[in-house]
Every structure is written in C-alpha cells, then in structure tokens.
Image (cartoon, helix red, strand yellow):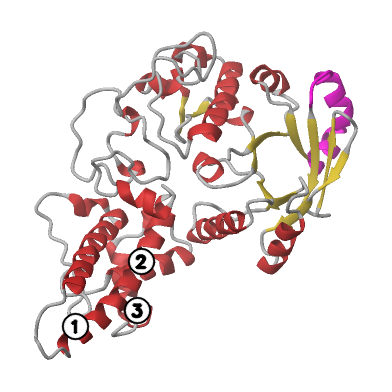
Amino acid sequence: MKPTIWVRNPEYCVRECLEVGISSYIWDEPYLLKKGMDHLAFMRLWCAGMDWRSLVVNDESETAIETRADEMTLKHEVWTYGQPITKLEEKVKKVAHTGRMVIIMRLPSMKTGIGKNFMRLLDEIQQDYPDSIIHIHALYSWSLLFGMDWRSVDIEPRAAARGGTIHMPNGKRVRHTRATEMPEWVSVTGMRVRDLELPRNRCIFNLRSALWAAENYKETPKFATKFVPRGPFSKKSRSKRIFFHLVEPEDGDKLLCNTCSLTDNCRYYREGAICAVPDSEVADLATYFNTRNADAIIEGLGELLSTQAARLQRGMNHESNSDDGELDPAVTNLFDKMFKNGERLAKLINPALAKPGLQINVANIGAGVTPTSLTGENIKPAVMAAIVGELEAMGYARHEITPELIEELLTKKAATALPAGA
C-alpha cells in the first residue's frame, strides 16, 4: 500500500502542488502563528471545489486537528520521540480502523545509528498494526519515507528547489546541474533536463519525484526513459533492460546501491538499498527479508548468522557424539549456508571485501575457529554485526565505521556479543 503524501507548510508552493494534483496539506502551528495565517481561509481560497485536507500539528501541545473540504474535523494522535515506546504502541492500537493517524514528531537525526535503529523499530510497529496509520513528519530522505511501510508521510519540496537541489525519484539529492548525468531519471517524471533551470519547475519535479517514489520505490519497474509529454508516469514503451547504457561494473559493485559505480545508470538504484540486479550475490536477501533497506538487512543477516551458529554447534556436537563417525549432510548444508551468509555480511559492511583475490575466512564456525574480520582478528559474523550495531548506537553512521573503530571495540565486545558455544 502506497503512503498518502501531504505537503508541509505549502504557502509558497500551492500552485505547484495543485498542478501535480496534491491538495492535502500539513501545517506546523508555530508557522501559522508566525505568519498570522488562517489555514482554512487559505484552503478555501486556493482549493475551492476540491476534496482538500488541511492538518494543523503542534508537538508542544501534542495536538493534531484535521479539517476537510466537507467541514468534517478529525483529531489525530501525536507522539514525539523521547516518549515511552509503550505510549506509542497504545496510540497505534487506539487508531486502528478509525482513519485517524499517529503523527510521529521530533525524530532524531537519521545520520546516526540511533535514528536508523528507531526507524526500523517504528517500521516493525507499522507492520504489526497494518490497520493503523503512522504518519512520518518532517523527514527528507526518500529511502526512509518511501522505502518502508508507512501509511502517510509529508514532504517539503520548495526549499531544496529554491536552493538549486532536486530530489531524484530513486532517492538521490543532487544539484540540478547534475541532471544532465542522469536524464533518464528526469524523464520518468515527464519532465526534461532543461526544465529544471527554473526554481518553480524544480519544485514541480520534486513533487512528481515523490509521487513516483510513493508508487515505485520498493518495486523495480523497468520504466520507459523517453520523454512522455502526455503525463509523468506513462507505462508505455517500458524497457526490458535494467541498465540505461552498457557499462562494465567495477570491483565492489552490485552490493550496496550507495557505493556502486553504476548508480546513475541503473533502473534498480534506490538510495540506502542493497542491489536488486538478478545476478547480484545479495539480490535474494531482499526477498528473504522482504526489504531492500541495507541497514535492516545487515542487522537481520547478523541475527540469522547467530541463529545458524547455534544450530550448527548443536549439529556438530551431535555429529561428534555419533558412534558411526559419519558426517551429517544437514550439518554440511548448514555450514555451506553460513559460509555464504558470512561472506555476504562482511561484504555489505565493507564492499571493499568484494575485490578479486581478497579472501574472507568464514570456515569452521562453531568448531573453535571463527571467521576473520575486517581487522584480521578472529570474529564470528554475528559478533561483527553486534559490533557494528554497538558503534551505531554510539552515534556513528554506517559509512563512518572503519576497521580501526571495529578493532578498538573488538576485545571488549566480542566476548559478550556471541557467547562461546552459542
């Protein structure tokens, strides 16, 4: 189910919003007070005859009142980051099947592990209560707004456009002058590169980009790349190719979208995702974990390895106690799976490990010999995931985690992250 898109404080971009068909607006009450605005008078002036919605939120008073074109009002729930999670879950349960929302406000920085971990937790809550509507307020990342399972989100398209920045449908935020490097991602919105020279057109592009992302961000459509004058999302002339042009991948490509050299050339590129190209060695992980979110998959893969390690240890103990001395095929099969998953986890944490000739030792897990980490020390893949999670909780972003940081925590964390024999 695609999320409903609201535009935040649209005083200066209402024309552009109406041009693309968006008439649901969310206002921060302090903004209205500062401007001395009557949001209902604004809506009746600009959206007369339309099925509009106007929502005023205030995180201080924890109020959210929506008024609709038919004069119906609806009171939504507000939850601000820092309040108990139990209170959030109570509110989410309360709004189920009512059409009311729980609006999440004052989110932490998404550049930190704390912020990313919280968003994964919040996404799990939305999945647990699909009949409740969680609304994400005041975020800018397409991967977080459209790569998860929210029922409702809001965007602010004008400020970036006025400053010369555009938000590509695939999640990239770039200067509009870079659009010449990726014209295919411009044409998917029904616009031309030359259109983006004007701030107003950049605002329209950002709005259309969000509409496309709401529909397709979690999918992998092989969309047409020729300019389509009849509308922004024509499904005619859809290409069977994944890449716009034939380009050879480099070492470390086809793992993480953010570090791949093929980003501007790939229809499957999504900011913050793992590779979905069929011949990629990690493509099946998206199906297994039901997400392409790289952070969620790395965390899930670490937990999977921990479970597999425990099962393998039990299987090997049973095998060693067997009187016939024969190897158990099930143990061998599980070992092979752990070897593959251990390699993939290490490469996702550090794509440099995908270089040819670089060995990743993930042999003999559970038999007293542990895999080799990025630092050259012995460490189980699940422990590696635990250390990365620990660093993220301390505030390090994923791209800031280096072998040196891992080595610094290795001695004191490896012993507790995965107990011996687990």
Kind of residue sitting beneath label 2:
Leu
Q: Residues within 10 Å of mark 2 (few under 14, many from 20)?
A: some
Q: Which residue is mark 2?
A: 304
Q: Are marks 3 and 1 in contact (CB under 8 Å)?
A: no
Q: Earlier in the sequence, mark 3 or mark 1?
A: 1
Kind of residue sitting beneath label 3:
Leu
Which secondary structure, mark 3?
A: loop
Residue 89: name its quadrant.
Answer: bottom right
Mark closer to the observer (1, 2): 2
231, above or below 399, in the image? above
Q: Earlier in the sequence, mark 1 or mark 2?
A: 2
Which secondary structure, mark 1?
A: loop
Q: Residue at x 38, y 65 (%)?
A: 388
For the residue pair 266 and 125, the one nearer the viewer reads as: 125
Q: Residue at x 43, y 21 (%)?
A: 177
Residue 227 image point, x, y percent: 44, 11
Q: Main secondary structure of the magenta part?
A: helix
Residue 397 is one of the magenta-drawn residues: no
Tell me: 324 left or right of 227.
Answer: left
Q: Which residue is mark 3?
A: 418
Q: Are marks 3 and 2 in contact (CB under 8 Å)?
A: no
Q: Which residue is mark 1?
A: 368
Which residues are the magenta region?
28-51
Residue 306: name its quadrant.
Answer: bottom left
